[in-house]
Amino acid sequence: DAKTTQPNSMESNEEEPVHLPCNHSTISGTDYIHWYRQLPSQGPEYVIHGLTSNVNNRMASLAIAEDRKSSTLILHRATLRDAAVYYCILRDPFNFGNEKLTFGTGTRLTIIP
Amino acid sequence: DAGVTQSPTHLIKTRGQQVTLRCSPKSGHDTVSWYQQALGQGPQFIFQYYEEEERQRGNFPDRFSGHQFPNYSSELNVNALLLGDSALYLCASSLTTSGGQGLEKLFFGSGTQLSVL
């Protein structure tokens, strides 16, 4: 499985934008970039995914580098409820074994009131 | 619309015992996956069930087994419990489409916290 690298932890002030980086230098041409987050005492939840173009949804935006070796999850206005562990995951829909999500240790985001 | 439900929420067992965890998928979903999450780590894939068959398995011993029922609900069984089996066990459901896997969203339950003493 292609591997991702994320900072262990980040802090941000409430109501400020947050940029969560992810490096994936060995990404293949068919790997999609997925983000999940895990709030305290809950299971992970889907945030967003993309292939090449930047993506937006009601939760966040995903900015993908032109060479696709890195990406950034953007929370436009962080709230205390965004405090969670954020996971960046690569998934190739065309390879056997892609049914599973391969989680790393993620980035623990702390929001400062 | 009920999401993924898991039972029980907490469980305490002793070494050598057997345990069964249960999962009901989100309405409309037909695929169930199980993950183990040790403290401070990301979830690790155990296996996935679709059409009552194990479709994919992670690097876990045969002590871990599962089952999927016709109503798509699932059980995870762990035999001969070890102290190292203490973890949060997460169930995730999804919908398998004709286009294959890899892009569908997974919906997770809140997990079962298993403690082995």
Image (spheres, grey):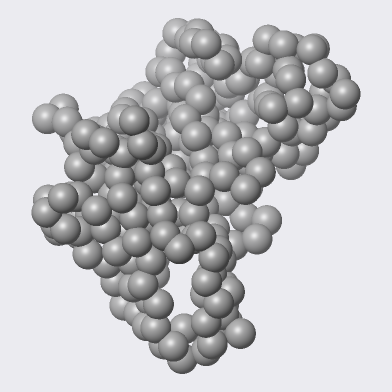
> Is residue A84 at least partly visible in the picture?
yes
Write the residue at 24% across / 53% down: B73
Most distant residue in the front direction: B1
Residue A77 position by quadrant: top right
In this view, A95 is above or below A51? below
Comparing A43 with A104, the one in front is: A43
> Is residue A107 at least partly visible in the picture?
no
Would residue B35 be found to the left or right of residue A61 on screen?
Answer: left
Comparing B53 with B61, the one in front is: B53
Q: Position of residue B54 (x, y in %)?
A: 20, 59
Write the residue at 50% across / 48% down: B110
Q: Position of residue A74 (x, y in %)?
A: 64, 15
Write the residue at 66% across / 43% down: A40
Write the residue at 88% across / 23% down: A113
Q: Position of residue A27 (x, y in %)?
A: 46, 31
In this view, A45 is above or below B111? above
Count of numbered circles in the view? 0
